[in-house]
Amino acid sequence: MLLVCVAVVVYALITMGDGRGPLIYSEHLDDVAVTVDEKEVTFRDLAFYILYEERKVEEQARIYNPDYTKDYWNLHTNDTFIQEEAKDVVMGMAVHDYLFYQMAVAEGMDTLTASEEDELAFAITDFWEDMLDVQWENLPCDEETINEQIRIVAIAEKYQDYLAKEQGPSQAAYKYDGYYYSLIRDEHSVKINKKLWQKFVMGDITLEHTKLNYINGLTDADKEKIKDKR
């Protein structure tokens, strides 16, 4: 119990940075989040990835502890916090897609066929249908901008498939966490704006957590049972 509390407090101090607390994401949409080669990717450009990853982790959190989903975000596993891991995934996917998108543009492969446009339309529809209600209330930017980001993802994935077919060994090898992709990334310049990025709290950008329980994994019902036994 004490170790859990200490870990949460230490992490809170880290995210506060210079003592002014976490930054408000919507106030920094036009600031540069990462530069991929010469392309400046703003925090607005990360909106899709944040919405997607926060929804995915929150759904897992609701299974873990439906009464206090923030507990799951604050779990410390594999030498890192869940919310920091989710943050790394967001940046990793964004860098991957904007790099591959630029490469696709350079090779004249930035257009979609009619069937690919249909697949994109379905993907956009699925994305919005899967959104949590609270996320609709906290959209980082307008829907049109996010839809355009999903289009960039589609073109990046098309280029990813192209590399897999031309060079092998598999499509997975060129995903954001794939080995062959990591070799390609190492050949390019990637500069993350860590000064700002570290001050955003993943899980609290498009979601709202008003309660934090330090007894991780226990629902309100579980705690009532413990009280009854006492």
Image: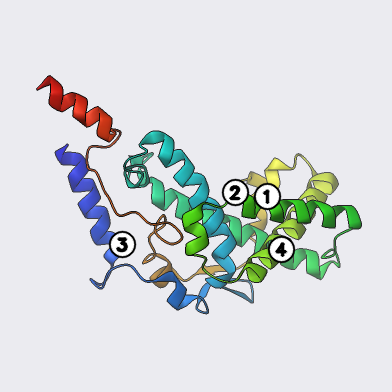
The image shows residue 143, relative to residue 210, as above or below, that is: below
Q: Position of residue 117 (x, y in %)?
A: 83, 57
Label 3 – label 2 distance at C-alpha: 29 Å
Placement of the C terminus among the 4 image quadrants? top left
**Mark 2 or 4, nearer chain start:** 2
**Mark 3 or 1, nearer chain start:** 3
Residue type at mark 1 is: Asp
Q: Position of residue 11 (x, y in %)?
A: 27, 54
Label 4 – label 3 distance at C-alpha: 30 Å
Q: Which residue is mark 3?
A: 15
Circles 1, 2 touching at the beta carbon (< 8 Å): yes
Identified at 82% across, 65% down, the residue is: 110
Q: Position of residue 33 (x, y in %)?
A: 51, 71
Q: Position of residue 123 (x, y in %)?
A: 72, 52
Task: Say few, some or many: other residues with alpha carbon within 10 Å of mark 4 (under 14 / 14 to 19 / 20 or more).
Answer: some
Task: Say few, some or many: other residues with alpha carbon within 10 Å of mark 1 (under 14 / 14 to 19 / 20 or more).
Answer: few
Secondary structure under tag 2 reads helix
What sort of colour scheme is used for the picture?
A: rainbow
Residue type at mark 4 is: Ile
Secondary structure under tag 1 reads helix
Q: Which residue is mark 1?
A: 126
Circle nearer the viewer, 3 or 2 = 2
Q: For the view shown, which residue lies furthest in the left direction?
A: 230
Task: Say few, some or many: other residues with alpha carbon within 10 Å of mark 3 (under 14 / 14 to 19 / 20 or more).
Answer: some
State the mark number for residue 130.
2
Q: Which residue is mark 4?
A: 152
Circles 1, 4 touching at the beta carbon (< 8 Å): no
Q: Is residue 20 left or right of residue 197?
A: left
Q: Is residue 198 left or right of residue 11?
A: right
State the mark number for residue 180.
none
**Mark 4 or 3, nearer chain start:** 3
